[in-house]
Structures are given as C-alpha cells and as structure tokens.
Image (tube, rainbow, N blue to C red):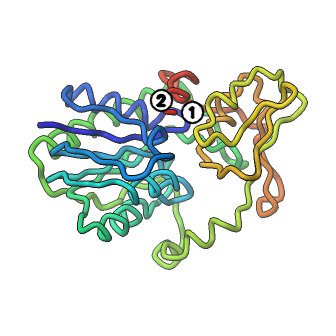
Amino acid sequence: MATDIYYFSGTGNSLHLARELKKRIPEAELIPIASLLKGNVVKTSAETVGFVFPVHLMMAPKPVRTFLEKLDLQADYTFAVATRGGSRTRAFADLEKILKKHGKSLDSYFILNMANNDPKFENWHQTTESEMAKLESELQNRLNLVENVVRNKEKYKEEDTYFKVQTPFFSVISPILPVLNRFFNIEFYSDSKCSGCGTCEKVCLSGKIKMVDEKPVWQDDVQCYFCNACLNYCPQRAVQIKSKLLLKSYTTENERYHHPEVTADDIAGQK
C-alpha cells in the first residue's frame, strides 16, 4: 500500500520513531512537515497517511496544526503517533478538530513515551544510558503494535493511561490550553558561551534565528516553533530560555538532550 508519513521533529525523538516505523513499513515515504509549511495546498495521493510529531505543552505543535489545515487529504486510512516526555496530551483532539473541517478523522492514534527534551524546569534531568535503553526497548515493542494496526487498517484510538506526569484538572484545563500557552511568553537568547558556530541557525526549523556579527538573533517578525532544537543542539550550551511567567530559567544549570542517533544535520534537513 502507498503510505506517506509526515513528521515534525525538533530534537530527534519523533524523527527516530519515524525512521524505525519506516523499517517496518519499507514502502512508506518519510516527508518532513517543515519543508511544506511555506506552500499553499499540500496534496497526497497515498492510500495511508500518518503523522509523527512531539507533544508541545500538552498540545500538537503549531506547525503540525498549520500543515493539517492546508493538507488535501484523500487517504482511506489515517493515523498519528505522538512522542512525549510523559505529560498528558490533547494532541489528537487538536488533529481531529482540524480534520473534521475537511470531512476526515483519524482512524488510529498512539502515544509513545520518550526522553524528555525540555530542560527549563528545576526537576529535569538528562536521560541516562540505562533509561534510554529501556525507553528504546519499549518503543520497539510499541511500534510492533503500530505496524500491525496500520497494516491491517484497524480502528485503534488509544486511551492514555500511562502518562508519567500528573496534571490536576486536565479535563478542565485541556479546552483552554491554547489560551493558557500564550501566557508562557518564552524567549530564547544566547549567553557569553556562544562561539558563533551557527548551529542554532542551522537547526532552526522556522527560520527565526539569523546570525548577525557571529551572534544569533531571534527575529521578532518570524514565528518560533518552540521545538527546542536551538537549545538542545548548541554545542556550547549557550542558548538559554527566559520567561516572565517562570521567573527563573534552569537552562543555564541543566544539561541538554537530543536523540543520540539524530544529528543537527538531520534536523536541519527537514527544511
């Protein structure tokens, strides 16, 4: 069967998953969402279409939602796989709302826990090798399920019962998350450790970062995708986050994470 898998990945977890899924469905074509965001209507003639993406602040990422708005979807089977560090999510409800406007819906969706790539909180810790090995083993087992469901075109909408982070009043908060997330007001900047290597500009999927006099500038007129690629791929750990709401950012003290099998060139290649 002709299969298109559209993916978005900031620090490699979702790209790694998409690659592993392609090993199970070799005829599938992996297509980066970031490369299609500047165009108009996106058409696909594949019989099966999948979406692989990370959870951002409990939601589907903005670029993924933007992409779905312009996708001319004619597939007879549609699925989605979301990766996350452990928080609950309303990502599939986000996708379903958009698809419904086009007379479509998801036939199946899955949630896979992976290493957390968001080091701006005090209790964040870099995933150890043993933790990565366990997560990878779980991922491979879960992908067996994904493959079986997708190949047989089964209806399978997974109930989220194994989240790692408790979210009090999630059912109440969920409908207003798009509004709440606007108040986080997160900004990125580089500190004195910056060597001017340009890695942040290279991996920036939105094109927000521009090197000026060998220093990165986050342009005000370009929307950030908040994918954390610049933060986690900086070799000097010079990219930091500041937020009026958080009052203090722990990125200056915490380590960084990106998937060990996904390079900065791999991330940049999505553009």
| Badge 1 vs badge 2, beta-carbon distance below 8 Å | yes
SS at mark 2 in the image = helix
The N terminus sits in image quarter: top left
Q: Is residue 83 above or below residue 247?
A: above
Q: Residue furthest front?
A: 40
Q: Position of residue 150 (x, y in %)?
A: 17, 44
Relative to 84, 107 lies left or right: left
Name the residue beneath numbered marker 1. Answer: 127
Residue at figure coordinates x 81%, y 42% from the top left: 189
SS at mark 1 in the image = loop
- Residue type indicated by callout 2: Met
Question: Quick one: label 1 or label 2, which is nearer the N terminus?
Answer: 1
Name the residue beneath numbered marker 2. Answer: 132
Q: Is residue 51 above or below residue 18?
A: below
Q: Position of residue 67 (x, y in %)?
A: 43, 52
Q: Is residue 243 above or below residue 143?
A: below
